[in-house]
Image: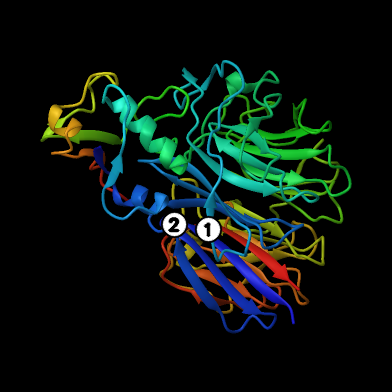
Amino acid sequence: MSKVRVLVGTRKGAFILTSDGKREHWQVSGPHFAGWEIYHFKGCPTNPDRLFVSQSSGWFGQLIQRSDDGGATWNPVGNQFVYDGVPGTHQWYDGTAHPWEFKRVWHLEPTLTDPDTVYAGVEDAALFVTQDGGQTWSELSGLRCHGSGAAWAPGAGGMCLHTILLNPNDPQRIIIAISAAGAFRTDDGGKTWRPINRGLKSDFIPDPDAEVGHCVHHIAMHPSRPDVLFMQKHWDVMRSDDGGESWREVSGNLPTDFGFVIDVHAHEPETIYVVPIKSDSEHFPPDGALRVYRSRTGGNEWEPLTKGLPQSNCYVNVLRDAMAVDSLDSCGVYFGTTGGQVYASADAGDSWTPIVRDLPPVLSVEVQTLA
Amino acid sequence: MIRVVLPAHLRTLAQINGEVELEVEGAVTQRSVLDALEARYPMLRGTIRDQVTKQRRPFVRFFACEQDLSHESPDTPLPPEVVTAKEPFLVVGAVAGGR
């Protein structure tokens, strides 16, 4: 029977939540790496028992942990992330030049074909890759050095590369996103990059439709249609049908189009999910009611999903990497909150139950559907 | 033999119980002690000092004999009490609140 493993990164450790395919009863394992910040925790598509964790601390820096037995045992692997050449400067919050400094790994993306090859998105924004299972990491510096890097600026969470989308039809094409620089694409496996932000409009930057400077919060893609992209921007939910060449707004009837997460149903490429957040200055759901919004039309028409979610006095946030879907039938949807709840829906969002209620603030949620 | 005391998170990471006892060849300095520590426990590389510059991480401090040695040169000899193992060399996480 199928099994589901939910990988949760929190401010104080990692947790593994497992269930059979019914997704009614859950076992909770953790905290792993207790007391450390776990920005991301993800398994390899080609070897689901190989898991990678980004473990960091303001005191002791960055570590990468790897498990080859589904999280039963762990080994630290390479943690040396050195920018290629002289890193130069980017913009600081006040517009002054600020030196590039490595702070942490925000996102680990194992490739679709090789469990030893993994991409890492880091703060200050850059893309690294390992080809030896995490022992050594090297920068794909064509991104940071393509020309606009000096104009990139940090968002409130830091200048982080947080989204890495791999194209199942074309391993040379990778799409990444940086807060607050925007989305970028390579078509040659990471050697050369260009911004793909045409159609984005951000009223909080001097030139609202600038080529770079947009605070992209997350991008999602369905593997069957890798040219169709859905973006939750700082404000605005956006869609591209041409691999990011152009974007159009699909916020439609959302109560607010600010938010962090966005994801796509595993079997319905036009069904997408967001969690609207009140505003950039009030990072909690509108009206104190936690509502996932689902569109079955690829955007514009949205319906609130509330069954099982708190509808009063709820003031949590859902951070950018904290939503995921499984590939069972029907599709399971999962998200974690800054209040420490991980909610699961085994019916594509129609109803929700908390798997756990009292974890540390949740930074990331990933799901593995296991045979 | 040099005695080194690590903070709890790093003891857990390196799977160490209690103090570490290290043999250090030549002059006993912050640098030579940390070199020996990282050679025995490679997983500690980058957690106490930068892997490239070898500079102390900002929220890590070094104490011994009730003295703060954090701002000493890494090549300054450590106190005789540390060299003779009468006192340990302490690696301490800065008291910096939390969230």
Residue A318 is labelled as 1
Q: Position of residue A238 (x, y in %)?
A: 72, 47
Relative vertical location of residue A121 with respect to residue A264 in this rendering, above or below: above
Three-letter amino acid code at the position of disc 1:
Val
Count the marks. 2
Q: Quick check: can you spot residue A5?
A: yes
Per the image, label 2 sits on a secondary structure element best described as loop
Q: Position of residue A237 (x, y in %)?
A: 67, 49
Q: Nearer the viewer, residue A189 or A89?
A: A189
Q: Position of residue A2 (x, y in %)?
A: 73, 78
Quadrant of image for the C terminus of chain A? bottom right
Q: Quick check: can you spot residue A160?
A: no
Relative vertical location of residue A283 with respect to residue B2 in this rendering, above or below: below
The residue wearing badge 2 is: A33
Q: Nearer the viewer, residue A138 or A254?
A: A138
Labels 1 and 2 share a subunit: yes
The residue carrying pointer 1 sits among few (fewer than 14), some (14 to 19) or many (20 or more) residues within 10 Å by Cα, namely many
Relative vertical location of residue A107 with respect to residue A317 in this rendering, above or below: above
Quadrant of residue A139 within the rendered picture: top right
Three-letter amino acid code at the position of disc 2:
Phe
Left or right side of A3 for A356: left
* Mark 1 vs mark 2: in front: 2
Residue at image location 84% in from the left, 37% down from the top = A172
Per the image, label 1 sits on a secondary structure element best described as loop
The chain carrying label 2 is A
